[in-house]
């Protein structure tokens, strides 16, 4: 009887401990954190306006913005708690910041677009359009700027007209961007001039850094044709990886590059940086985006009608549709 009573007490203690852990969020908190990292921010175009949504790995949706203005280009803060976005009104493009649940929206900067959060600290890079008339007093050429996440510390890095497609290096010390004359890299601290990495008659955009920060993959467009190239960060060693290709994104591990192909039906492929081991992951897919652990790829597809957000494993297996919204979904971005 004593042994049974002892076991009963131990069982009661274990049950109570389990309830206590659940109440405190341990270990369930780790499950919640893992689930949060599976969230994807994207832009939804209903046909009337653009809104920022977040969808989790089970397809649960949340509209973050809900306003008459157009909201676009979501970018997660490095801790995953906030999202920077571009809001377009009839007057201008402005940079806003919102909490990940849609609360606490506030304007961070007037006259800005393509906001991208640093991967290592609470700074945001963005482009600014020119203002005024060239050659007249008061003309502002715009350029590339950085600002702290609280709106302080605004600083101009370049005066390049229409700096766009911004990409921070993995260590947060440099920013690659596309200008009218190619892709350039500038020190994020503003300690030097921008250095041109590509310079030709083509349109060079959509740079993505290797995990070691030594190379960049990008899309090169000539008319309606586009190829992807890789180049060292100092501008040397440029070579073409794939023809009829676009939207290249380096994996977090640095081993593979995912990209879209417009040769025939839209497809998503992976390839090594030396051009070998090309592999088709899925058909009817665009705009690949790696998860932070490199195990999944989000993409958009029209395979079921509207252009929706899908996710698949990094080897192309297990494709699943996440969104079911009437309209067009673009720009998937994983929560860090």
Image (tube, rainbow, N blue to C red):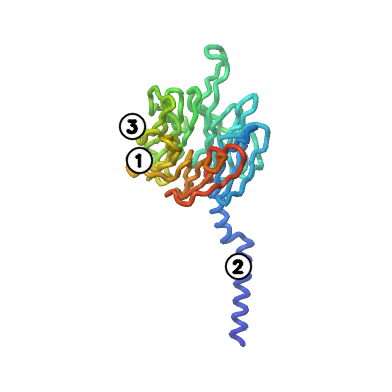
| Label whose residue precedes the other's in the sequence (1 or 3) | 3
Find disc 1 in the rendering and name its residue.
273
Q: CA distance from mark 1 to mark 3?
A: 11 Å
**75 over 134 or under it: above or below:** below
Identify the image quadrant of residue 244.
top left
Q: Which is more foreground, mark 2 or mark 1? A: 1
Dot 3 crowding, Cα within 10 Å, few <14, some 14–19, many 20+:
some
Identify the image quadrant of residue 191.
top left
Find disc 2 in the rendering and name its residue.
18
Q: Position of residue 72 (x, y in %)?
A: 58, 34
Q: Nearer the viewer, residue 71 or 190?
A: 71
Q: Position of residue 51 (x, y in %)?
A: 62, 37
Q: Nearer the viewer, residue 107 or 75?
A: 75
Q: CA distance from mark 3 to mark 2?
A: 58 Å
Left or right, residue 108 beside residue 284: right
**193 over 60 or under it: above or below:** above
Q: Position of residue 19 (x, y in %)?
A: 63, 66
Q: Which is more foreground, mark 3 or mark 2? A: 3
Q: Position of residue 231 (x, y in %)?
A: 36, 33
- Residue 94 in view here: yes
Q: Secondary structure at mark 3?
A: loop
| Label whose residue precedes the other's in the sequence (3 or 2) | 2
* Count of labels in the image: 3
| Label whose residue precedes the other's in the sequence (2 or 1) | 2
Q: Secondary structure at mark 1?
A: loop
Find disc 3 in the rendering and name its residue.
238
């Amino acid at each position: 009887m004593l042994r049974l009573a002892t076991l009963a007490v131990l069982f009661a203690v274990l049950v109570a401990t389990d309830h206590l852990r659940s109440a405190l969020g341990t270990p369930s908190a780790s499950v919640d954190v893992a689930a949060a990292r599976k969230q994807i921010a994207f832009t939804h175009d209903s046909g009337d306006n653009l809104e920022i949504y977040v969808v989790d790995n089970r397809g649960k949706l949340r509209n973050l913005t809900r306003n008459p203005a157009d909201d676009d280009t979501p970018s997660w803060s490095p801790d995953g708690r906030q999202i920077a976005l571009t809001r377009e009104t009839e007057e201008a493009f402005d940079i806003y910041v919102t909490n990940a649940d849609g609360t606490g929206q506030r304007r961070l900067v007037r006259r800005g677009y393509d906001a991208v959060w640093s991967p290592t600290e609470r700074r945001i890079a963005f482009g600014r359009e020119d203002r005024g008339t060239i050659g007249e007093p008061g003309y502002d050429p715009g350029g590339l700027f950085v600002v702290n996440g609280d709106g302080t510390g605004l600083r101009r890095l370049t005066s390049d007209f229409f700096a766009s497609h911004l990409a921070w290096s993995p260590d947060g010390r440099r920013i690659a961007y596309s200008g009218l004359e190619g892709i350039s890299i500038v020190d994020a601290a503003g300690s030097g001039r921008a250095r041109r990495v590509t310079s030709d008659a083509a349109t060079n955009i959509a740079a993505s850094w290797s995990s070691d920060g030594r190379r960049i993959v990008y899309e090169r467009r000539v008319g309606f044709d586009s190829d992807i190239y890789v180049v060292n960060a100092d501008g040397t060693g440029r070579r073409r990886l794939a023809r009829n290709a676009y939207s290249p994104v380096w994996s977090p591990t640095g081993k593979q590059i995912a990209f879209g192909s417009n040769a025939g039906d839209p497809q998503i492929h992976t390839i090594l940086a030396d051009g070998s081991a090309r592999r088709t992951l899925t058909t009817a897919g665009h705009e690949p985006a790696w998860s932070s652990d490199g195990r999944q790829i989000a993409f958009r597809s029209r395979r079921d009608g509207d252009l929706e957000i899908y996710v698949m494993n990094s080897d192309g297996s297990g494709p699943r549709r996440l969104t079911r919204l009437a309209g067009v979904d673009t720009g998937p971005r994983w929560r860090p």
